Amino acid sequence: MKNINREKIRELVLEGVEDALDRIENQYEDMSERASNVIGSLKEKTGNAYDSMKSKAHYARERTQKYVHSNPEKSLLIAAGAGALAALIAIMMVKKSKGCRHCRDEY
């Protein structure tokens, strides 16, 4: 009688394990499919964003070239001013990072 109960228990445990494994496999397949869909969507969105930025950059480049060609003197002055401002900011950052008390008080 003990052997019959043991066999029945073993059978029930194996059925339970097989059912659990089947459920895990199904959940894995569902999650894998969802992940694949999300990755595909992200790839598409990333590609669209890249294409959009590339198009905008190309458009901005063309407009800048046309403006510089049409207004060379004004473009030169704007570039010089921007360069001077960038240099001033860089100098301030370098002086500040070196810990010069006099320089920190000036700015």
Image: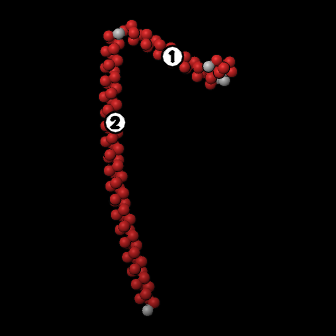
Residue 36, x across and y down, in percent: 33, 51
Q: Is residue 83 above or below residue 52?
A: above
Checking the image for residue 49, the label placed there is 2
**Name of the residue lying farthest toward the top:** 73
Query: CA–CA distance between discs 1 and 2?
Result: 32 Å
Label 2: few (<14), some or many (≥20) within 10 Å? few
**Which residue shows up at 42% across the image and 82% down it?**
9
Residue 18, x across and y down, in percent: 37, 72
Label 1: few (<14), some or many (≥20) within 10 Å? few
**Name of the residue lying farthest toward the bottom:** 1
**Which residue shows up at 51% across the image and 16% down it?**
85
**Name of the residue lying farthest toward the right:** 101
Q: Quadrant of residue 45?
A: top left
Element type where label 1 sits in the image: helix
7 left or right, relative to 89: left
Q: Quadrant of residue 2?
A: bottom left
Checking the image for residue 22, the label placed there is none
Q: Is residue 8 above or below residue 24?
A: below
The quadrant of the image that shows the N terminus is bottom left
**Which residue shows up at 39% across the image and 11% down it?**
75
Element type where label 2 sits in the image: helix
- Identify which amino acid the numbered label 2 is placed on: Ala
84 left or right, relative to 26: right
Q: Is residue 87 above or below residue 7?
A: above
User: 9 or 107: nearer the eye?
Assistant: 107
Residue for badge 1: 85
- Identify which amino acid the numbered label 1 is placed on: Leu
Q: How many marks?
A: 2
Residue 72, x across and y down, in percent: 36, 9
